[in-house]
């Protein structure tokens, strides 16, 4: 029981310091001292400050990626000729589940999206982006979207950035879901338009 209490206190102190200062600026010595322990006691649990950060966010990171994978699997199960028509509904249901998960883990979501610089989760948004690109590709039966790589990266990265901001800034679940529904309409309608019009090479050619 003592070991469990010690670890819990270290985690609570670490979360407070990481949220306030980010991973890089947070002092391990201060984290441990505010928890009421020595560095020697800390090293009985973790070898580095980064290991401590990982312990706080890993379950939430995997949960987010799992939600996105479930969305892709659901879309993949739809017959090919119905995928494009079904993408909006799959997105709506999947985003609702993802929002609920993020709201239950709001501090950890903030750590991942705003405080992870200097850790292996620094590029977590890029991992989410890759999941998003896979999801969109499955909707069309293609291996890639007819967009330049930079356009794909910026569009999907901005979508997930907006999702994170909606969760972190929204006052209620209803407000967050409505906000994401509005954003989703802009993104999905725009991407469907791109998919149905002329190839990217022709679209991007100068007059």
Image: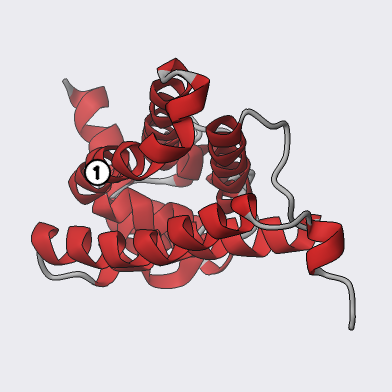
- Residue 41 falls in which quadrant of the image? top left
Q: Is residue 113 above or below residue 81?
A: below
The residue lying at 56 percent from left, 52 percent from top is 125
65 vs 152, left or right, is: left
199 vs 127, left or right, is: right
Instruction: Report if residue 90 is visible in the image.
Output: yes
**In the displayed image of the protein, which residue is found farthest to the bottom?**
207
Residue 43 placement (x, y as % from top left): 50, 34
39 vs 201, left or right, is: left
- Residue 92 falls in which quadrant of the image? top left
- Residue 185 falls in which quadrant of the image? bottom left
Q: Is residue 100 above or below residue 71?
A: below
Residue 135 placement (x, y as % from top left): 53, 36
Query: Which residue has dot 1 on it?
Result: 9
The residue lying at 42 percent from left, 60 percent from top is 18
38 vs 7, left or right, is: right
Q: Is residue 69 above or below residue 103?
A: above
Q: Secondary structure at mark 1?
A: helix
Which of the pair 194/164 is nearer the observer? Answer: 194
The residue lying at 20 percent from left, 69 percent from top is 170
């Amino acid at each position: 029981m003592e070991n469990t209490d010690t670890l819990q206190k270290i985690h609570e102190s670490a979360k407070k310091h990481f949220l306030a200062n980010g991973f890089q600026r947070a002092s391990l010595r201060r984290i441990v001292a505010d928890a009421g322990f020595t560095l020697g006691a800390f090293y009985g649990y973790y070898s580095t400050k980064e290991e401590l950060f990982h312990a706080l966010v890993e379950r939430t990171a995997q949960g987010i990626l799992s939600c996105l994978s479930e969305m892709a699997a659901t879309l993949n199960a739809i017959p090919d000729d119905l995928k494009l028509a079904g993408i909006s509904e799959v997105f709506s249901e999947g985003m609702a589940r993802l929002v609920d998960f993020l709201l239950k883990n709001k501090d950890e979501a903030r750590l991942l999206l705003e405080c992870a610089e200097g850790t292996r989760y620094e590029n977590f948004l890029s991992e989410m982006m890759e999941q998003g690109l896979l999801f969109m590709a499955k909707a069309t039966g293609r291996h890639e979207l007819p967009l330049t790589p930079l356009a794909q990266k910026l569009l999907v990265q901005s979508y997930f950035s907006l999702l994170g901001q909606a969760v972190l800034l929204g006052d209620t679940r209803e407000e967050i879901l409505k906000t994401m529904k509005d954003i989703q309409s802009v993104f999905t309608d725009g991407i469907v338009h791109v998919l149905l019009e002329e190839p990217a090479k022709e679209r991007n050619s100068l007059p």
